[in-house]
Amino acid sequence: MNDEQLETWKKNMQHYNETPFKDGVTPREPIWKKNKATLWYYRASEKKYNVPIFIIYSLINQPFILDLQTGGSTIEALVQKGFEVYLIDFGKPGLEDRDMDVSDVITSYIQPGMKAAINHSGTTEMTIMGYCLGGTMAAIYAAVAEEPIKNLVLFVTPIDFQSPAYFDKWVKALREGEIDRFRYLEELGIIPSSHVEAGIRMVTSPLYFTPYLSLLLNRHKKDYVEKWHRFNTWTKGHIPLTSGVAKQITKDLTKENKVINNRFEVNGKRAELSNIKANLLVVGTEGDRLVPLDHILPIINRVSSIDKQTHILKGGHTGTSVQNGKLPAYLDSWLDERSNPIEKQ
């Protein structure tokens, strides 16, 4: 690449670093709102199943990664398969939400959102899909829920925090009471999205240049560039974290490991994992630096589900890996067998 081409590339990169995308590609409509949160409904292309899907995504990333691009969208693949899909989008918290913690998210947003989805669909049972920290909240909710949960699917979901995956010296000092764990969080009130992104980068990609090299090598491929741009928008679109959530993650999850030990409480009700009887699918990945398998798999032995399976993927912190508009075979067959297909007349 000569100097002129390099200069052109530098100017183009300013465009690629813009983040113009805010939503996914599949048509949807809001059916319930509260504060910053919205419950989105995605209508099935042709309804083929009696058990809709309720999706809970993480609190630190925007959920449009699940509807990133035509042909590569999890939500699009689900509605094309014949599922009604509901997605709880928590939105971006403001300083007025600073005290909101994980328990509040479950009782004030997930539970009423689930009720709204049940009422809207007229169903008697629901499948919950949880991703990463959204999966942690899904498992906690399933352990206290009175609503009818038939299936629970957890993607790269941390449940057991006993062995630190990163920052092990910090975690050790935290558990031994050697650091003031809350002063910084309380003073901020809201952890800015830039801080959240920096924390993730420290674990996954301290030197963040490989994606740009890939873009450089594939700059002549229109589809690749568009997908790269959308994905880059998502990676730079972290959501601010309330100090309440950050404090509860620090104390109840990281320090005291309450979820796997059945000591996490939601409105005074203990979230016993043995209360979970739904059909359970736990999905992890071998190369995940954020959520390793020893954080994911222990839930299998703590639930009361008779039908429970694990599926291990290769790669990093990934989810359903939709290709050519189709769900991966393992998920396609698992859902099909457990979602009460509508009999053709």
Image: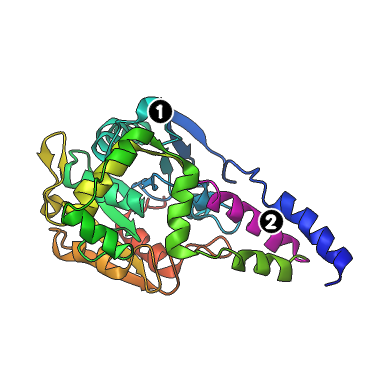
What kind of element bears circle 2? Answer: helix
Residue on which disc 1 sits? 95
Residue 175: mark in rendering:
none
Q: Residue at x 24, y 54 (%)?
A: 254
Vertical comparison of 182 with 173: above or below: above
Amino acid type, label 1 = Leu
Q: Nearer the viewer, residue 162 or 152?
A: 162
The answer to whether 194 appears left or right of 246 in the picture is right
Residue 226: mark in rendering:
2
Q: Quadrant of residue 100?
A: top left
Instruction: Please say whether residue 154 is one of the residues in the magenta stretch.
Output: no
Instruction: Please say whether residue 224 is one of the residues in the magenta stretch.
Output: yes
Marks 1 and 2, the one that precedes in the sequence:
1
The local crowd at label 2, few if under 14, some if 14 to 19, many if 20 or more residues have their Cα within 10 Å, is: some
Q: Which residues are magenta?
A: 220-238
The answer to whether 269 appears left or right of 330 in the picture is left
